[in-house]
Amino acid sequence: MSQLRYEAPGSVDEAVALLASDSDAKVLAGGTDLIVQMRSGLRKLGLVVDVKKIDELMSVSSDGGAWTIGAAVSGAEMNENAALKKDWPGVVEAVDLIGSTQVQGRASAGGNLCNASPAADSVPAMVAAGATAVIAGPNGRREVPVEQVPVSPGKTSLATGEMVVAIKMPAKPARNGEAYLRMIPRTEMDIAIVGAGVSLTLDDGGTCTAAKVALGAVAPTVVIVDDAAKALIGTKVDDAALEKMAAACSAACKPIDDKRGTIEYRTKVAGVMARRAALIALERARSN
Amino acid sequence: MPTVSMTVNGKAVSGEVESRTLLVQFIREHLELTGTHVGCDTSQCGACVVHVNGEVAKSCTMLAVQAEGANVTTIEGLANGDDLHPMQEAFRNNHGLQCGFCTPGMVMTAVDLANKNKNPSEQQIREGLEGNICRCTGYHNIVKSVAEGARNMGG
């Protein structure tokens, strides 16, 4: 029987060296996906590299309004950071939907991103908000929009030896609001059948000048719906604009059909969730 | 085998474990603290909830080695000798358990909830218990217990 080898390096450089030494090595953050996958036999693990002992991955900082969130910072900690929650409530609320309270005590946004589930709650919210992922690897560091990390269910674009060290959130634009909503068949502790993240920015007259709409759980990876953003930009985000945006969202869906939700249902509900999220984002934009 | 050291219920403990040993296995089998239960083993049911460095966690979804150096509290760490913790007392007073299997996890979650919100509403309690499942369907009395326990902890 293969043995699980556990390492808990104290620095990013050591972690990268360990990851580079074994192409099957896995990063362990909260472990709320990885350990369940291991226990259920879905994934055989050799080397796991625990990154929760690395200060950089466990700290949250703000510089000139822009946020750097260590990739292994727990959802609970993000939720307890009032300043972060004030700037990016949609992202924090999305992280707060992952699993249950106890899962949020361990799970991180970085882990949610790298687990590459199509239904990851934090991902559409981070994409809508314009988040980037800082990736460290044997050849140094690079920064990419978060949507470039997951490439298919369970797979990321990270090369051998690479790891996400932080999620960066831009400085909050004036009169910007964002929100994330999801549909689950139960009231709590379930996996999204549709998730919708919406970010929009208004000018002084209340006209939408910028928008980003991202959907989860309706395709193998997060879907950025440009037509939905276009439907909002230049409008006062009135009913007609919201209808057009919802239709664009439904049109962009290529969901699976499973026990949680049919194709027809997911497609319809994508528009409904995006519309409701947009209304919350609009209210937040007006008060920012 | 790796050696793991942590503080459990205020006492320094250590042991040799395989890397794959779960925190709950370490607690139950090495420390022989069997109050923490294993229900589903997949992070769903919440019978295994403990506190790790002040946050609630499902100990079936943590490796023991991940808790190296951590401060862990289990259900055994709540009572003071024969005096039950106010949350335990509230579960007793309100008949907040039937078979008792989910109870350790319910109580550990409830204590965390009350620590973070001294006067939770019924809605907040129900939402706060999202990660704990009771198969006896005793939620009504559990919610009453948590409300009373929170009041008595804050008072």
Image (cartoon, rainbow, N blue to C red):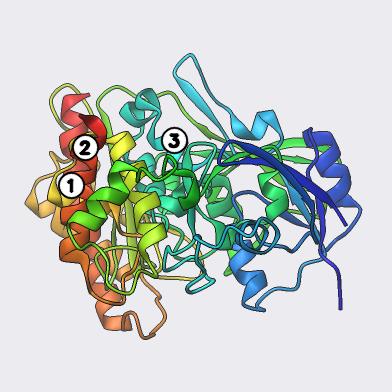
* Residue at mark 1 to residue at mark 2: CA–CA distance: 9 Å
Q: Tag 2, which secondary structure?
A: helix
Q: Tag 1, which secondary structure?
A: helix
Which residue bears the numbered disc 2?
B152
Q: State the image coordinates of residue A84 (x, y, percent, origin top left).
A: 40, 28
Give amino acid for label 3: Met
Q: State the image coordinates of residue B56 (x, y, percent, origin top left).
A: 45, 47
Which residue bears the numbered disc 3?
A78
Which mark sits nearer the N-terminus, 1 or 2?
1
Question: Subunit of mark 3?
Answer: A
Residue positioned most to the right = A21
Q: Are marks 3 and 2 on the same chain?
A: no
Question: Subunit of mark 1?
Answer: B
Residue A224 appears in the figure? no
Which residue bears the numbered disc 1?
B147
* Residue at mark 1 to residue at mark 3: CA–CA distance: 26 Å
In the image, residue A44 sits, relative to residue A241, either above or below, namely below
Could you tell whether A90 is left or right of A239 in the image? right
Give amino acid for label 2: Asn
Q: Determine which of the numbered discs, if any, sits on residue A64 in the image.
A: none
Give amino acid for label 1: Ala
